[in-house]
Amino acid sequence: MQIIKDLFRKDIYRKIEEVIKVDQHDEGTVKNEIQEYVATPDIKDHFCQVYNAVAEYPSEPHEGIGIWVSGFFGSGKSSFAKILGYTLANRKIITQSASQWFIENVQDKQITNFLQNINSRFTIHAIIFDVAMDRGVRTANEQITEIMYKALLRELGYAEDFDLAELEITLEAKGRLKEFVSLFNKEYSPATWEEERDMAMGISEASAILYKMMPNVFPREDSWSNSLGIKKDSGNFIGRADITPNKLAERAFELMAKRKPGAGLVFIIDEVGQYVSRSVQKMLDLQAVVQAFGRESKNRFKAKQIVAPCWIVVTSQEKLNEVVDAMGGRIIELARLQDRFPIPIDLKQSNIQEVTAKRVLEKKDKGYESLCELFDKNEGHLKTYCKLERTSRNTTT
């Protein structure tokens, strides 16, 4: 006689994450997510479709760098996008790369060949976040352009506040950022520049340091801070730094060249469909961002300024055409949007049953044989005693 728990291939007491969070970067958790991932034949085809596009880009550079991943809640779109980002970036997870963990799990020759090809030819940096949960999103009215810029700045080690980031970028270009940080930390110890800037504070202090560094440019301690705008009652400043889709694309490649030289870039943005839902302005902004990155990638690649383009992967519960239809369709041209997102990935409902059966219920070979034997012996009884006849539903209250 066997104990039921011993029939299963995997430990039934192991922790299984109910919801995959793209911004959960704990290495142990990510490793488990990759090892637990069930890639059905359809899902493997989707991975190959994206990997093939990435691998083939250098042979014919183009502007279609958008990937729209759709599927209703529970379909696995977040898992798909997250693993896509980790494997393209080939991030190290504990003892080996994410790609190697994934290759060992899926046991698919085509995926193996694609990943080995991509990882050996390109260095790709992945910026992965949930647009609905990202700490950089302060109001529901923020545009995708602003959210992506904050994520880029944070990932590359700059201040998320646009004015402070602009200061860092300017000083870095002049070769004086390290000097500024050193003077700031010495002057305001035990506070550090990183701590102050991450709280969007330190503007007055930074202004005073700039006065010490460049008195000819900033003749007073408040010269730089006053140049940003006007003070609120709380003492916070209303900055003047702004970002547009075109500027974001240009700035992304410029900053990557400084902080991640030689690396390509992929944005993995979860729940974009929900964020832009029924907002024409947000959808137009998303369209403009993908268009700007596509154009900038193509031009820079052809000019041999970069060795890998930027890819933008977004997820949505709805297909792209369904999101557009909900906005009235005519205002936003579907054809133009589809040009921006030429790779649509739609995760089917039929995958869920297969994934659940394999991930949770898969049996050991011996366990499967034992269950089949038991079923064969008791099939008649099961059909007799488990069959429902003449049933009705009581609808009275």
Image (cartoon, rainbow, N blue to C red):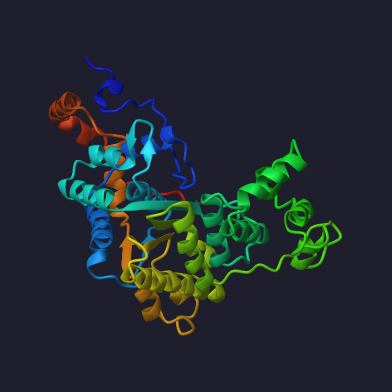
Seen in the image, is 60 located left or right of residue 296? left
Q: Residue furthest bottom?
A: 330
Q: Camera-side residue: 333 or 181?
A: 181
304 relative to 178, above or below: below
* Image position, residue 280 (x, y; %): 54, 76
* Image position, residue 268 (x, y; %): 43, 55
Residue 195 position by quadrant: top right
Residue 231 position by quadrant: bottom right
Q: Residue furthest front?
A: 216
Seen in the image, is 20 located left or right of residue 58? right
Name the quarter where the N terminus is drawn.
top left
Q: Camera-side residue: 199 or 178?
A: 178
Residue ID at (26%, 56%): 51
Residue 224 position by quadrant: bottom right
371 relative to 319, above or below: above
Seen in the image, is 162 located left or right of residue 295? right
Q: Residue furthest top?
A: 1
Residue ID at (18%, 29%): 368
Q: Camera-side residue: 212 or 24?
A: 212
* Image position, residue 262 (x, y; %): 37, 55
* Image position, residue 112 (x, y; %): 20, 46
Residue 397 visible in rendering:
no
Residue ID at (28%, 60%): 54
In this figure, what is the number of numbered marks? 0
Q: Camera-side residue: 141 or 152?
A: 152
Residue 255 visible in rendering:
yes
Residue ID at (58%, 67%): 143
